[in-house]
Image (spheres, helix red, strand yellow):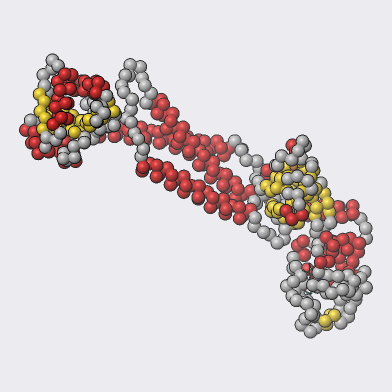
Amino acid sequence: MMGFQQLDGVRRVLIASANPLFGRGLERLIRQQWQGRRFEIRVVGTMEETLALLESWLPDLVILDYDDRSLDRKRFMDLFVSGNRAMQVMLVSLQESGSVVVYDRRVLTPSQAEDWLSLSEPSGFQSPSSGKEQSFSMKHFAIAGSIVVVLTLATNYLLNTIQILPLQASVQAQPIDRLFSLQFMLIAFFFSLIVVFMGYSLIVFRQRAKDESEEGAYIKGSTGLEVVWTIIPIGIVIYLSYLGSLALAETRRVDPQAVEVKVVAGQWFWRFEYPQYGITSDTLYLPVNRQAHLRLTSLDVIHSFWVPEFRVKQDALPGENLERELRVTPTMVGQFKVRCAELCGTSHAYMESPVVVVSQADFETWISEQLQAIGADPATRGAKWAQTNGCLSCHSVDGSPGVGPTWKGLYGLTDHELADGSRVVVDEEYLRTAIVNPNAQVVKGYPANVMPANYQALLSDQQINDIIEYIKTLR
Ligand code: HEC
Ligand SMILES: [Cu+2]
């Protein structure tokens, strides 16, 4: 950029405007301002004259009327840019208000215009020297850009290593943690982008001692930029919500072999019921690597079931019809804690219960220990299992008809007729097969595929034996 010093050397000034008032007014201003200096001024009114003088007269400074459409500025610029002479150009607009607007949109009062004539320089204008300027700003972009990259990587590394997230101990935690790590990366990037550009500008472009120069260019709006910074965030948000819905679907995937647990919340305790076993516990025991299907309900206010290591969380609502479900597949043997994540009264903070994840074998041991505690003889327990596992909603024990055949008088039949016409003896073996594989022997007169076929997974061997003992008593 040519500075004030070079303005000192100005000898020939060419003013181009079809408006004679513009030319004369400006000429007067310059003559006042540059009193005592040697210079020439010429005012021309047409494009042709301007171009002719540019070639023959070789002006040092050209002032163009910004508002004069008859001056083909583009043609002029081409000539100017391709020429190799040092020449300054100013685009100037005289407003009705009496102020002067220089092409870079600075607005000056007439008195300031005088300052401008003596002090300022055309800046930001396409001039032969602007190549240097451009590589100068590219250099800043390159430096700031590299700092952004480094800071993004560092911040992301930090976010991933300071263990913001607790241990990952369930299958459902995996898609959630993948979302978290994506979020961390985005957070690290945008944090760096904003902080680096702001900090870099504050430091590198600060006003230095003795720097008296004017403020920077006045920039008003940028449609392109605004479109870009609207579209990109919208795109990111839509993409994240897409990933979020995928993750949500993954956390709700159903495993038919799941352990059923009814979770009852109250002020201020948790109770866990295992309807398949008829067990109630204040500790949540779960077998590892097997899905637990938690059905949550509350006895009083809203509570929320949350084991941070499992990530997923669900409210427990009061009301018969407001049962909520949650699926958790623990992947780690160990002790965790369920907390209430919904402010539920004075002891909310202490509403914690142990969660114990054990191997499948240990889980069964725990179940049979609990069952022994229940005691009783096998048939009595069997009656209980038949009740708690829903068998009795289809089977009666008093001979009355139901969805399935009654159990009364079933055991010991010697010519029990099946749908395929064969006749069988009803012994323990037959009953066991009828329970664990109901479609293998369909009873005549009853539909196949109605009785659930997954009792082998839902019930322990012990329980199936108990139920058989119970059916044997119904003679
Ligand atoms: C949704 C209804 C339904 C439920 C629940 C149900 N069953 Fe059945 N069950 C049937 C039907 C229908 C049949 C007859 C068709 C067949 O044999 O598959 C049947 C057949 C049987 C038979 C053979 C009966 C006979 O006359 O030979 C036994 C034993 C049996 N169920 C046990 C059970 C046990 C134990 C449970 C609970 C753990 C249970 N069922 C739960 C519908 C049900
Ligand atoms: Cu609570």
Which residue occupies 41% across, 26% down?
202
The mark tally for this picture is: 0
158 left or right, relative to 315: left
What residue is at 33 percent from the left and 27 percent from the top? 216
Residue 367 drawn above or below residue 347: below
- Which residue corresponds to the image point at 26% horizontal and 22% vertical from the top-left? 112
For ligand 2, give the image quadrant.
top right
Q: Quadrant of the N terminus?
A: top left
Tell which residue pokes out farthest to the bottom in this image.
Answer: 421
Left or right: residue 299 compared with residue 17: right
Dividing the image into 4 quarters, which one contains the C terminus?
bottom right
Query: Residue 369, image x and y in percent?
Result: 86, 52
Q: Position of residue 85 (x, y in %)?
A: 14, 31
> Residue 261 in the image: x percent, y percent?
76, 54
Q: Is residue 424 above or below residue 328?
A: below
Residue 212 falls in image quadrant: top left
Residue 411 seen in the current view: no
Q: In this view, which residue lies farthest toward the left?
A: 56
Using the image as rendered, state which of residue 387 and residue 365 is in the foreground: 387
Q: Is residue 355 visible?
A: yes
